[in-house]
Amino acid sequence: MAEMKTLHVFRGDQSGGEEVAYEIPVEAGMVVLDAVHQIQATQAPDLAVRWNCKAARCGSCSAEVNGKPSLMCKTRVDAIEGEIHVRPMKAFPLIRDLVTDVSWNYEKAKQIEPFAPKEPAPFTMYQRDVERSQQFRKCIECFLCQDVCHVLREHSAKEQYFGPRFMIKIAELEMHPMDGADRLHFTSHQAGVGMCNITKCCQEVCPEHIHLTDDAIIPLKERVADREWDPIRALFHKTAAR
Amino acid sequence: MAQRAQALTPAPRRRKWEWPWWVSPAGTVTALGLFTIYSLWETLTHSSGQYHNYLSPFFSPDVRAIGIQFLPAIWVVWAPLLFRATCYYYRKAYYRSFFSDPLACARPERPGRAYTGETKLPFVLSNLHRFFFYVTVVVMAFLWYDAIRAFIFPNGFGVGVGSLLMLLNVILLSVYTFSCHAFRHLIGGGLDCFSCSRGPILRYSLWKTVSKWNQEHATWAWLSMFSVWATDLYIRLLISGVLHDVRLF
Amino acid sequence: MADGMIERLSYDVVILGAGGAGLRAAIEAARPGVKVAVLSKSLLGKAHTVMAEGGMAVSFGNVDAQDCWQTHFYDTMRGGKFLNHWRMAEIFAKEAPDRVVELEQWGAVFDRTPEGKISQRAFGAHSFRRLAHVGDRTGLELIRTLEYKGIHSGFDVFQEVTATHLFQDDAGRPTGVFAYHRQSGAFCVFEAKAVVIATGGWGRMYKVTSNSWESTGEGAALAMRAGAEMKDMEMVQFHPTGMVWPPGVRGLLVTEGVRGEGGILLNSEGERFMLRYDPEKKDLSSRDIVARSIYKEVQAGRGSPHGGAFLDITHRGADFIRRKLPNMYDQYLSLADIDITKQPFEVAPTIHYTMGGISVDPETAATNLEGLFAAGESACGLHGANRLGGNSLTDLLVFGRRAGIAARDYAAGRTKASAPSDSAVADAEARALAPLGKTGGESPYQLHRELQEVMGEHAAISRSRELGEAGLGKLEEIKERTKRLSAPGSRMYNPGWHATFELQAMVLLAEAILQGSLWREESRGAHWRLDFPDADDQGFGKLNSICRQDGTKITLSTQPVPEMPEELAALFSSGHMPVREGTDQGGHS
């Protein structure tokens, strides 16, 4: 007889909802997404959940498991003591059950100036020069960092701040050795890097273990400071650029 | 192969034990609060931190040498204090613990408060971190001088508990200072292409080294704060005669 | 949306699928004055392409200077057991370098060689180190690059919109698609002059699969129902190394890069058995051979505890493994509690790729239906009987682009496309709504599981007449039951409803696979018949199977494999492998 576990899954839409309890048998190595699928297949066929790859590659199955923003496909059932509560991401408008409307992210993505190569490819670039951009390009766009970021989550400051996901997108482009565009004014004003108070929750939840705050946001703040707070270095940069 | 087979079947995952969420902010508030109170008491009620060849870090450089007698510590401590106040790690610590912005990840904040992050006064001034870094580097030079002097007793070279404390303190302070994000940016992080710079390998490896130490910046921040505290307290106790310095060598 | 009010949007080119092929086609099709829509059943950037790990094959010769397009062509044809369309393989090998450089121009950041060029790694059955890669997440790099290039390219992306029907005029040309928004359940008609199918494969009709669980082949089924010819459907690739334990992740891919970076396969007796099956290429033999070898070891009682083989890369050292195979390290640690830097781990064959698919013209990716194009895994022709690792990502780029150009040109030349009639729209709507809100009928989840069991048993790694015929019988029963599907609940983001479309597509394609595997009475590449264990080069080896839907039946016919022109055929008859002119003959170092 398999061990049984209780999952409390949020069911509802914009007009309201509540957690519904489901009992499921636990399999070895089971992850929360397996459990949700099991509920879908046997108890609630219309339980809305977004998922694609089931291998922690696509970043679709973001939700909050026992209050922690997580990928359901990477959260082991046996790693959780007691009952499991699964809720949709809080920072985005709810569509239904565990599915939220993340389209805001795609709008922000469009506003960032794309990669602007200084010269035609193929490039001569060395590994040491690309490893920073490569780290940020590991991002699977699960938007868990956006969800946990208190600026977006608690203060709904979506007009003032693009969120951690797009800070690393900007950092990736700014640190690309072959990129010729300048996004620092944009970073400080439209994208709102100053709204981040570097409390690092994004870094804690990232399933790809990207050091968002230390390697992207803080370096961006320093680059903005070069430009806007450090007349000496701003001058130096101008002469060096010539 | 039996062993191998056994190793391949995963045991039920050990459930990771975690501190309750409030432990970290409560600890930060307590530690930073006590340190602040201690610093105020130390700097505002004492006119010297000198005990023979030991000089407390609160009082270094010794401004009495240029004739300033009034509360010599406050002429000095503002620099490291502001360096720490604008440090990327301490910012995280106090935003979370003192301003609950946020208290812990994914935890509701007090509703209805305006939030402007680091875009408005006073927090926007954190952008000046690098300038406090420069000043702190100067202070560090004095602290190294003090640490060396702590090994020179009237009868020549010697090692006391105080000397060791001062040496440990200046090492921790140096690691903390030079693992700072501003320095990491200055040394190479600001470059888009290491290979295109002058001395590419040097710039890259310096940046890489600083990056490595920077990962534990929080640890260095706490350890160096406690070492300053301990060093100063030890010297204060020597001055007041509660303790006697133990000479090891 | 009120009843009877179905939104109509008009485009020149409608592309189904937003994976590598779909996005690449869209980037090419979207030119000033050309309206292009991309329909994606999931969010942008989540397609199965993200799961590609090892790299994209391209004959730059950055690491092995002898490599050239002829060698790449040679390897691809040999790997495909000469069932490939030679012209596709030729175009592919020639254009691959330009397409990959283009990615770099658009912001892709590949791993570098010490000289600052794009690094290339060894992979199964490639004669040289050929795979441009980014750690073990090359597919993510490809799709992210195309995604961010795409959002500035001026085409419209409709996320979480599923197409359920292809409208055609009297001549069979597509006039648009019927689709629904998963989020709201609202229907929409996309009128189009040209349609590109780029919806990927259908590996999810098998239980043990490395495919994204959304690889369910709706696009291919749409085309097939419209009358498109499906080629070589029996060719379904097993990747030799998938995860085995725990059950929840069975089938999850273990990149060939593990072996490319030096990993070796061992049986339960600790023997490196690939030395026996392929002494020359050893662990890096082609996928069909390695998969079959593992299967045979298990059959012979030398399998690992959960029915696979051991893969061991511990000798490369922990640092190396974590740097070169970070995802693999993480995947085993978090999902199976196994540290691959310290111990060997179990692997077993898993369904990986569908070589068969919509038959297309090599130059234009056009199908037999005028105005309908197909590219990527949903199309067929490049890979023959067995796909080489790393060839699929480059395939998406080369033929995605060609499909985009051809669809754009075709749309430009077709001034007046008749719009789908109201009655055709009403029909499509009624069909889509049929299972919705019903209770007590067949559950799509349950039928899907049964389909997986049938395919796993009757159309898997080893096949026979007996197995195939029994499989068709069982499938017939499932097909009958799909008429009574029910999906309780509302229209709003209802996964049960969505599953009914996926299931119907898979059932259709499954029948073509079973028919093809019954017809091909030989063993070739991925297709292994226990009752015909040898290749029949002069007979079946010269034929492609063609399945098409004929009313409610699927009929199978054959067509000869196109014959290579002399100068290409000479590459194979000379007795040695072609290498870049001016370099020495020899294998990789």
Image: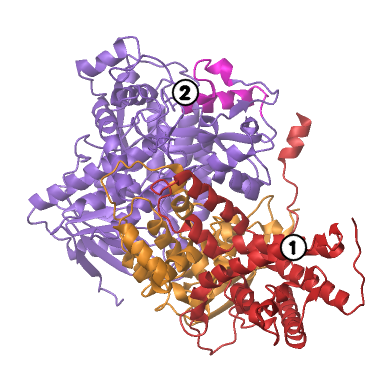
Residue A166 relative to residue C157: left or right: right
Tell me residue C61's x, y (percent): 35, 28
Inter-mark Cα distance, 2 to 1: 81 Å
The amino acid sitting under disc 1 is Ala
Residue A96 colored in magenta in the image: no
Give percent across and percent down for residue C270. Answer: 69, 23
Tag 1, which chain?
Answer: B
Residue A139, disc: none
Q: Which residues, given as a range, are shown in magenta?
A: C274-303
Q: Between C316 and C43, which is closer to the camera in this rendering?
A: C316
Q: Which residue is mark 1?
A: B147
Q: Which is nearer the eye, A17 or A240?
A: A240
What is the letter of the orange chain?
A
Query: Chain C drawn in what color?
Result: purple
Using a 10 Å C-alpha cutoff, classify the residue at mark 2 as few (fewer than 14 neighbours), some (14 to 19) or many (20 or more). Answer: many
Q: Quadrant for the C terminus of chain B, please.
A: bottom right
Q: Secondary structure at mark 2?
A: loop
Tell me the kind of residue under disc 2. Answer: Arg
- Reading the image, the residue beneath label 2 is C529
Chain under numbered label 2 = C
Q: Residue at left 65%, top 33%?
A: C314
C295 magenta-colored: yes
Residue C389 sits in which quadrant?
Answer: top left
